[in-house]
Amino acid sequence: MTCVREDGSATWFTASLANADHFVSHDFLHYAVEAILGYTSAFYGLVAAGRDLNDFGSTDGVKDEREYSAEAIDAERLVGLIQALAADGCVPNYEALTEAWANSAEPRNSRPLPVTQAQLTEICTVWGKLVRHWRTIDVNGAMELTFPKPGALTTV
């Protein structure tokens, strides 16, 4: 995956064959969540602001201890829960998501579920379309996504 920022700079990530499907699905779900909820400081917002795609999570077994915005924490948590509760693009049960959200809360991120049933349905519809389209792309082909908000980035 390559992300091209508004200023023309870029960052890219290459997944291994063993985990490519997971990362593609996960990153498409991030796109859907962040675009539909209007998030600007979550994963793709951080990338648009200059963060390298390879600079998330742990590096050489050392956990990333940086501070993240509430949006970034909520987006990652929401993406993980939706992905765990649903197949690509299938809408998980809203009550199950609400329960999983509450059970996954830590004191620093115990905010209410940031998505309505209607938004969840829209997120999963977009996510499913992206994954299905991606699966039709030829090897070494490309798919371009642009964020609906100006100043974000293009994902290739």
Image: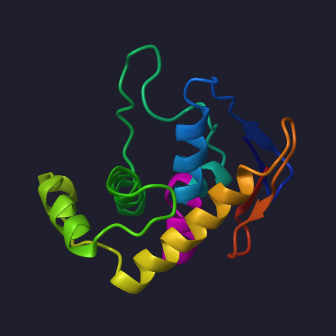
Tell me residue 80's x, y (percent): 37, 50
Most foreground residue, 146 or 55: 146
- Which residue: 25% across, 66% down? 97
> In the visual, does 119 lie left or right of 30?
left
Residue 59 visible to the viewer? yes
Most foreground residue, 22 or 61: 22
Residue 38 visible to the viewer? no
Q: Is residue 59 magenta?
A: no
- Which residue: 55% across, 29% down? 19
- Which residue: 34% across, 82% down? 116
Q: Is residue 42 magenta?
A: yes
Most foreground residue, 96 or 76: 96
Tell me residue 54's x, y (percent): 60, 31
User: Over which residues does the magenta segment extend?
Assistant: 31-43
Tell me residue 20's x, y (percent): 61, 33
The secondary structure that most of the magenta stretch takes on is helix
Tell me residue 110's x, y (percent): 17, 62
